[in-house]
Image (cartoon, rainbow, N blue to C red):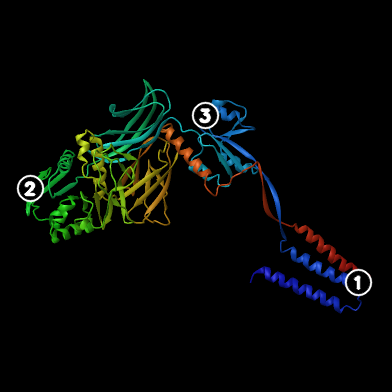
């Protein structure tokens, strides 16, 4: 039973007993006063246990701390009144103002100064980790202009030997001079692009690494002979996955001709079967010995990773061939890439896709965009007649500029099926746009290919982790047994994900830049790169701007609209009053009893 009920019951019994005794008292002098005193005595005793609360309006004054971060300019400092604080030694040395006070630790200062309830952030802002510690404070932040330089940059951290390394990004150049962006590797100029003045421009650079293993290239921005930025691009080149392609063509065309030659130049194994008439085929064998393929069976399909075919060629297959292909897709991870040239399904494999013809499509140019990444392609000089409808079970890979789906992927058992409605990508090759052609087919064939199973997978954060940073390592593995992790002879203690038991997280404080090897269970290792502290400063500043702006604008974030605000609070009446009331009423009963006697 709740003790509050027991106390209330005892107080009620005590009051009843006291009133009963008063009513039975022989001398009735001052009976009313004694009854009142008895009631007050018991009530005072009860309220010593039960708190008596009331509501009150309280005015809370805004005690603001002005925090200067990287990117604060002198003009914004001059406008501020009162003391300014910073945790950045560089700002302290740059401005040399008596108004600016250095804080070794913002969290320690806030813990010591309990009256601070609002923080005004100037400059580029704080990181996500730092912002999480300020949830209980009202924050204000005026988003500054983005700094000049590389605004975004993406490149694959792992590629296979023979593949192109694509570096995509954006550069802001608000100067009146051209900027030359150069990709260098092993001391060699690999590719470059000119950034026009007074604006922002996307860029794309390409290289074909020839070495196997870990590499670090350089992305350098020049203004004339002056170096504006020099950033490192770390990646790993792995032994090429020996992919094998089977191409089934209902009729040979230019699309097949260019695709077959491109796969051959990329050193892939290719068997090309083209139908001449019923049950009569011609064969081409590229980078592979001859194999009997007049009849498609489960046995000869095991020799291939990807089947490329037009929808008509698939429709011409026998029912047993269709069943064998389906079996290989579902159970053995065979990838199926379907070329569709009509706005309808003609084979059993394309029936799961929905086609839609364009109405009043007049454009003779097709602009493609890759949905998963920030990748654009040069316009294709073709007129697209139809597009595909998305569904819950599909993933859009390629769209046009109006976001109509043109290439869609579906998962089928352990394999994947891609339907491609873009029919004449060879036009890129004819117009000298070999980069776009290679990028298009490399991405899609990677999507349809069953990936080589990895025993472990890791990711690190922050994205551009630097020496001196606390690096979070996320590890996924087969099984849920705790892994043994070591970096540079330092043993890590991973924490298991409560929802996904095969995922683990560990923290590592890196003291030096460069490649690091994470040893797992003493017999496997995964590499990751740690950058110099001054690397990728522009991107780090942009990340801070975006993180701070998003944090301040979250719906549940505290905001001060004025310098003070009124807030209704609940207060508890001091128990000293009830102790005083108890002593007075009990004292009266005692004294009155002595007077009557």
At 21% from the left and 53% from the top, the residue drawn is 334
Answer whether residue 91 is visible to the viewer in this image: yes
User: Is residue 468 among the parts visible in the rendering?
Assistant: no
**Sequence-earlier tag: 2 or 3:** 3
Question: Local crowd at mark 3 within 10 Å, few (<14), some, or many (≥20)?
Answer: few
Measured as percent of width and height from the top left, residue 442 is found at 24, 42
Tell me the number on the disc at residue 30.
1
Q: Secondary structure at mark 2?
A: strand
**Sequence-earlier tag: 2 or 1:** 1
On residue 282, the disc is 2
The one nearer the camera, 571 or 101, is: 571
In the picture, measured across the screen, residue 358 lies left or right of residue 79, that is left
Secondary structure found at label 3: helix
Kindly indicate the quadrant of the structure image that contains residue 38.
bottom right
Q: Secondary structure at mark 1?
A: loop
Q: Which numbered disc flags the more N-terminal residue, 3 or 1?
A: 1
**On-image quarter of the C terminus:** bottom right
Residue 293: x %, y % from top left:
9, 52
């Amino acid at each position: 039973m709740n003790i509050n009920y027991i106390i209330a019951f005892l107080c009620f019994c005590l009051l009843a007993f006291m009133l009963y005794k008063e009513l039975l008292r022989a001398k009735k002098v001052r009976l009313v006063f004694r009854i009142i005193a008895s009631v007050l005595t018991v009530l005072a005793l009860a309220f010593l246990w039960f708190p008596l609360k009331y509501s009150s309006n309280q005015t809370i004054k805004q005690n603001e701390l002005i925090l200067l971060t990287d990117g604060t300019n002198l003009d914004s400092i001059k406008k501020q009144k009162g003391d300014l604080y910073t945790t950045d030694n560089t700002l302290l040395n740059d401005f040399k103002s008596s108004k600016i006070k250095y804080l070794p630790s913002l969290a320690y200062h806030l813990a010591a100064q309990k009256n601070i309830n609002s923080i005004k952030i100037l400059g580029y802002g704080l990181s996500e980790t730092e912002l999480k510690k300020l949830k209980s404070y009202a924050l204000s932040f005026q988003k500054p202009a983005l700094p000049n330089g590389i605004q975004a940059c993406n490149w694959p951290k792992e590629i296979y030997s023979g593949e192109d390394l694509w570096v995509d990004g954006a550069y802001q150049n608000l100067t009146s001079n051209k900027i030359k962006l150069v990709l260098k590797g092993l001391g060699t100029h690999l590719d470059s692009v000119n950034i026009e003045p007074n604006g922002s421009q996307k860029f794309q650079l390409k290289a074909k690494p020839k070495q196997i293993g870990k590499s670090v290239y350089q992305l350098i921005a020049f203004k004339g002979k002056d170096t504006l930025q020099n950033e490192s691009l770390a990646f790993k080149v792995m032994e090429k996955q020996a992919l094998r392609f089977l191409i089934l063509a209902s009729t040979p065309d230019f699309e097949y001709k260019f695709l077959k030659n491109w796969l051959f130049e990329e050193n892939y194994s290719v068997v090309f079967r083209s139908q001449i008439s019923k049950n009569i085929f011609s064969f081409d064998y590229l980078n592979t010995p001859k194999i009997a393929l007049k009849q498609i069976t489960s046995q000869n399909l095991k020799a291939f990773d990807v089947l490329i075919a037009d929808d008509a060629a698939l429709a011409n297959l026998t029912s047993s061939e269709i069943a064998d292909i389906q079996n290989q897709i579902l159970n053995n991870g065979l990838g199926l890439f379907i070329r569709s040239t009509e706005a309808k399904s003609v084979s059993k494999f394309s029936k799961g896709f929905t086609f839609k013809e364009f109405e009043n499509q007049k454009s003779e140019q097709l602009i493609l965009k890759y949905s998963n990444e920030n990748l654009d392609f040069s316009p294709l000089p073709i007129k697209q007649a139809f597009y595909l409808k998305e569904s819950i079970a599909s993933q859009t890979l390629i769209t046009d500029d109006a976001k109509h789906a043109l290439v869609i992927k579906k998962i089928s058992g352990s394999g994947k099926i891609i339907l491609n409605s873009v029919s004449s990508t060879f036009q890129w090759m004819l117009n000298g746009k070999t980069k776009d052609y290679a990028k298009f087919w490399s991405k899609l064939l990677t999507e349809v290919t069953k990936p080589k199973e990895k025993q472990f997978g890791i990711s690190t954060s922050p994205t551009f982790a630097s020496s001196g940073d606390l690096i979070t390592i996320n590890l996924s593995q087969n099984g849920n047994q705790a892994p043994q992790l070591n970096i540079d002879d330092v043993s890590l203690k991973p924490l298991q994900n409560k929802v996904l038991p095969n995922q683990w997280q560990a923290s590592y404080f890196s003291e030096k830049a460069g490649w690091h090897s994470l040893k797992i269970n003493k017999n496997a290792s995964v590499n990751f790169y740690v950058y110099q502290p001054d690397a990728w400063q522009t991107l780090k500043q942009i990340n801070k701007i975006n993180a701070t702006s998003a944090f301040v604008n979250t719906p549940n974030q505290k905001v001060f609209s004025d310098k003070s605000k009124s807030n209704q609070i609940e207060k508890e009446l001091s128990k000293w009053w009830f102790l005083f009331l108890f002593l007075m009423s009990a004292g009266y009963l005692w004294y009155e009893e002595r007077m009557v006697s």
